Image: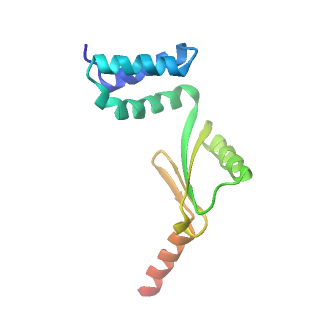
Amino acid sequence: MSYSVQQYAHMLFELLSREKTREKAAAAFVRLLEENHAVSLAPRIVDVYEKIRSEKDSVVAVAVESALPLSDDMRKEIASRVKTVYGKKAEIDEAVNASLVGGMRVRIGDAAIDSTIATKMQQMKKLLSN
């Protein structure tokens, strides 16, 4: 039987919600994809699944790129601000990028905040070259 990416994502959500062990649910879901020759859809299914889970669990994905690893206090501050603005719990995905020099970039859905020193230096260079 053929299912859409959205249907597979909803099935995955239901499986993971019902099964006591995530490993058992994941194995069952992979078997379903293999049986339906749909393994190539897995990356798209996971993307849709994450959106469904975020909506159902009141979680918002927050991508943070910073010059240095985040401190526990900084993670708490980000989570607190996300809760205040979005009314949802923050699921923070961190990446360290030394080329940013300092500061951080934060992405939540389509919104982005770039307070990196590298970006400020580029803006200053652009202003001075005019």
Of the pair 66 and 123, the residue shown nearer to us:
66
Quadrant for the C terminus in the image: bottom left
Q: Quadrant of residue 42?
A: top left
x and y, in percent, of residue 104 in the image: 58, 60
Instruction: Name, please, the residue furthest toward the bottom.
Output: 129
Q: Is residue 41 left or right of residue 17?
A: left
Task: Describe residue 45's horizontal placement relative to residue 71 as left or right.
Answer: left
54 lies left or right of 33: right
- Color theme of the render: rainbow
Q: Which residue appears at 69% of the width and 44% of the height?
A: 80
Residue toward you, 100 or 55: 100
Q: Is residue 31 visible?
A: yes
Residue sticking out furthest to the right: 73
How far across and how far down the image is residue 125, in percent? 47, 81
Residue 105: x, y in percent? 54, 58
User: What residue is at 35 percent from the left and 25 percent from the top?
Assistant: 6
| Residue 77 image point, x, y percent | 70, 50
Image quarter in which the N terminus is found: top left
Disc tally is 0
Residue at x 52% of width, y 68% of height: 99
Residue 11 visible within the image: no
Task: Relative to 17, say whether 82 is above or below.
Answer: below
Considering only vertical position in the picture, is 12 above or below 100?
A: above
